[in-house]
Image: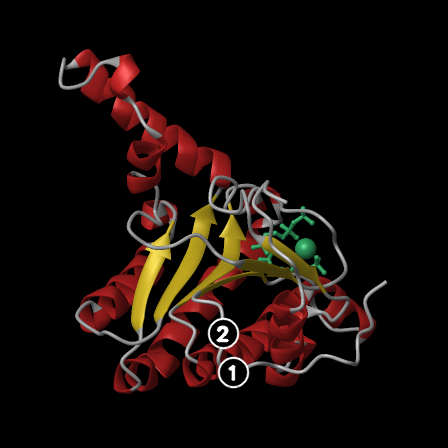
């Protein structure tokens, strides 16, 4: 087993793209006898610090899983509470994100969200669209299979129109039609809260990602623990099928 202590972060080898499954908000709240939404609220606070630290470290793309296509199965109060928190987060953080030259993007079909949430998101997208610093991708109503299906449907339509033949299809054509089109695959996917699964996150893009799992619950995930996870990634040998 890898030791949890002895990692030294190499600031010269920071990954370009870090993806995070922010899990454990509910358990964090439960441990404290609080409602689940208190956990989601605390999770937003943790997220603020991780975005800042990503920027400081020189990460180019940070992709966080905020709401999955499966999370609609939760009680409506929790779902609508999460969307309300998102509005609060965006309204509170947008000026600072913009001042830090952060570009906000959304991965997922956010048209299903309540109008007020859509407005807050679109304000953020519009305001930061020309920024050139950290790209902060928020996966919202996101599912990896849904994302691949959308790309497949578009390619199938292009084939039916006669613009392409089935034989001409390439992996790059699929990649270009994903939400991540044009950005590199994540070198590392971090998941908090001790769950050892992907839960439909970045299925195509994580083909050769390194996975770092930590038992820390998302609201407790500090910038120091984040750096430890990146250092753990830096200790891996990536072989891509070679020797
Ligand atoms: C992650 O925390 C946030 C979302 C999925 C929206 P959870 O809400 O899944 O927390 P646990 O897994 O129940 O502890
Ligand atoms: C994955 O966490 C989705 C997000 C973090 C947004 P879940 O808590 O929904 O995943 P499962 O249900 O444990 O697989
Ligand atoms: Mg969970």
Q: Is 131 placed above or below 173 here?
A: below
Residue appearing at x 51%, y 58% in the figure: 187
Label 2 and label 1: CA atoms lie apart by: 6 Å
Residue 77 visible: no
Which corner quadrant of the image does residue 87 belong to? Answer: bottom left
Q: Position of residue 111 (x, y in %)?
A: 32, 47
Q: Quadrant of the N terminus?
A: bottom right
Label 2 with label 1: CB-CB less than 8 Å: yes
How many numbered marks are there?
2
Residue appearing at x 60%, y 42% in the figure: 73
Disc assigned to residue 14? 2
Q: Position of residue 139 (x, y in %)?
A: 44, 55
Q: Quadrant of the C terminus?
A: top right
Name the secondary structure under disc 1: loop
Q: Residue furthest front?
A: 243
Residue appearing at x 59%, y 40% in the figure: 241
* Residue at which label 1 appears: 11
Residue appearing at x 59%, y 72% in the figure: 43
């Amino acid at each position: 087993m890898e030791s949890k202590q002895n990692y030294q972060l190499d600031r010269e080898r920071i990954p370009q793209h870090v993806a995070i499954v922010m899990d454990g908000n509910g358990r964090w709240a439960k441990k404290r006898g609080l409602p689940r939404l208190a956990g989601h609220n605390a999770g937003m606070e943790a997220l603020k610090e991780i975005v800042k630290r990503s920027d400081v470290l020189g990460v180019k793309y940070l992709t966080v899983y905020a709401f999955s296509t499966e999370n609609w199965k939760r009680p409506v109060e929790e779902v609508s509470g999460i969307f309300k928190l998102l509005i609060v987060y965006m309204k509170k953080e947008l000026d600072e994100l913009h001042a830090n030259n952060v570009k906000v993007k959304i991965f997922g079909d956010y048209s299903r969200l309540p109008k007020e949430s859509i407005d807050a998101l679109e304000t953020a997208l519009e305001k930061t669209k020309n920024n050139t610093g950290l790209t902060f991708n928020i996966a919202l109503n996101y599912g990896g299979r849904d994302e691949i299906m959308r790309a497949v449907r578009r390619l199938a339509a292009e084939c039916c129109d006669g613009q392409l033949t089935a034989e001409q299809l390439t992996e790059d054509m699929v990649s270009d039609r994903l939400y991540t089109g044009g950005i590199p695959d994540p070198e590392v996917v971090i998941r908090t809260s001790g769950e050892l699964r992907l839960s439909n996150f970045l299925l195509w893009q994580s083909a050769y990602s390194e996975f770092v799992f930590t038992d820390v619950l998302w609201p407790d995930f500090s910038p120091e623990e984040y750096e430890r996870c990146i250092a753990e990634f830096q200790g891996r040998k990536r072989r891509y099928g070679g020797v």
